[in-house]
Structures are given as C-alpha cells and as structure tokens.
Image (tube, grey):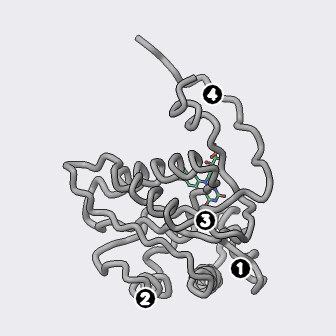
Amino acid sequence: MNKIIENMLTRRSVRNYKKEQIPVEDLNTILLAGSYAPSGMGMQSWKFTAIQNADTMKKVNEAIRQTLLTIPVVAETHPYIVSLIKKAEDENSNFLYNAPTYIIVSNLKDNGNAMPDSALAIGNMMLAAHSFGIGSCWLNQLPGLTNMPLIRELMTDLGIPENHIIYGSVVIGYAAEEPAPAAPRKDVIHII
Ligand SMILES: Cc1cc2nc3c(=O)[nH]c(=O)nc-3n(C[C@H](O)[C@H](O)[C@H](O)COP(=O)(O)O)c2cc1C
C-alpha cells in the first residue's frame, strides 16, 4: 500500500503519553505540515501556538480545571460536561493526558471558514506526527471554553490575538501504550 495511505489508515488517538519530549525539528515539521493545509480563499488566518514548557502546560491545565469548576450543573447539562466538572474537582486531574506537547489552533472569530480551516490544519499535523511515530489526540476542552473569561486571559498570556478564538487543539508525544485498533468503518460510502 502507498505509504501516505497507510499512514492515514494506521493513525489512532493516543491518550497515554511517555514523559519524553519530542524533538523540536519534528515539532517544526508537524507545524509546517499544518500550515500547508488548504484554507478557504487561501486566508491562512489561523495561528498555531505550540507549548512544550512544563510550567506553561500546568498553567493551561489549571485554567481548564478552574474554568470547568465555574460551570453550573443544571438538569440540561450534558452528562459528558458533568463528568468533566467532576474530574475538575480533583486538583491533580490532567486534561492534557500528561502529553509533553500541546498545540492550540486559533483563528479569526468572524471568518466563516475558520472551523474547517483549523480542523484541516490539525488533521495534517496529526498525520505528520504519526509519520514520525509520534502519537496525537484532538482535545476539545479548550475550544469549548474559549469564550470563558479565565481562558481568554490565558489566551492573551499565550500571545493568541484578541480577535481569535480557539477552534481546536491537539496533544502530541510518544505513546506510552499501543492504542486500541480502529473501530470498524461504518457503511458511509456511496459511489454514483
Ligand atoms: C472534533 C473532535 C473532537 C475530539 N475531542 C476529543 C476530546 O476532547 N478528547 C479525546 O480524548 N478525544 C477527542 N477526539 C478524538 C476522537 O474521540 C477520536 O478521533 C475518535 O474516537 C476516533 O478514534 P481514532 O482517532 O483513534 O481514529 C476528538 C476528535 C475530533 C475530530
């Protein structure tokens, strides 16, 4: 099988990471691959903020944890959100799977293509990482909380522009264990 297709078919989400940091050359190539994703009207209006500093990772994790704790649980709160809030009650909870590197993809609030553009960039990054034997997992907590005051403060500290919101984020690092095999593919293909 062609190596590119094989890379796509064998990537899996990794949720348990070794402490070992990935080489900065690999990080640069992963980010470069993200920057070559297609974007609506070629705008490239995204920004990729990559964090490898352990203290900054802790700060991000704590901002997510503290923000979750501000969310009131009401009858309509989705059970997944309730489970995240419960997890946040433990001050040792890690929302970044203890990965050594975290990439935040932000983009213009008012660009209608920002979501698909950002997702395509993250897809490229995940596949590039996998081609180096580096695992990854999309994380939705920070994007989901992007409009909360504490997260906006964090974004400013991280140098994310004021006219951006977070559309996606991805942790990367070496897998501490083999991820489970892919779920069987659903019957979604219809060729006319
Ligand atoms: C938009 C999006 C949001 C996701 N959010 C999370 C998340 O918050 N936490 C997580 O562990 N995985 C998250 N994932 C990973 C999916 O659960 C995973 O891709 C899916 O179960 C298929 O598994 P695979 O990536 O190994 O093929 C997300 C994936 C996508 C595309």
The residue that mark 2 highlights is: 157
Return the x and y of residue 69 as percentages of the image width and height: 65, 84
> Residue 82, can we see it?
no
Describe the element under mark 1 as helix, strand or loop: helix
Return the x and y of residue 149 as percentages of the image width and height: 45, 86
Q: What is the spatial separation of the Cα atoms under label 2 and label 1, in whole angstroms?
A: 22 Å
Mark 3 vs mark 2: give the one in front.
Answer: 3
Query: Which amino acid, mark 3?
Result: Ile
- Circles 1, 3 touching at the beta carbon (< 8 Å): no
The residue that mark 3 highlights is: 22
Mark 3 vs mark 4: give the one in front.
Answer: 3
Q: Is residue 30 left or right of residue 52?
A: left
Numbered circle sitting on residue 88:
1
The first of marks 3 and 4 along the sequence is 3
Mark 1 vs mark 3: give the one in front.
Answer: 3
Q: Residue at x 58, y 22 (%)?
A: 1
Q: Is residue 127 above or below residue 8?
A: below
> Residue 130, can we see it?
yes
Q: What is the spatial separation of the Cα atoms under label 3 and label 4, in whole angstroms?
A: 34 Å
Describe the element under mark 2 as helix, strand or loop: helix
Describe the element under mark 3 as helix, strand or loop: loop
The first of marks 3 and 2 along the sequence is 3
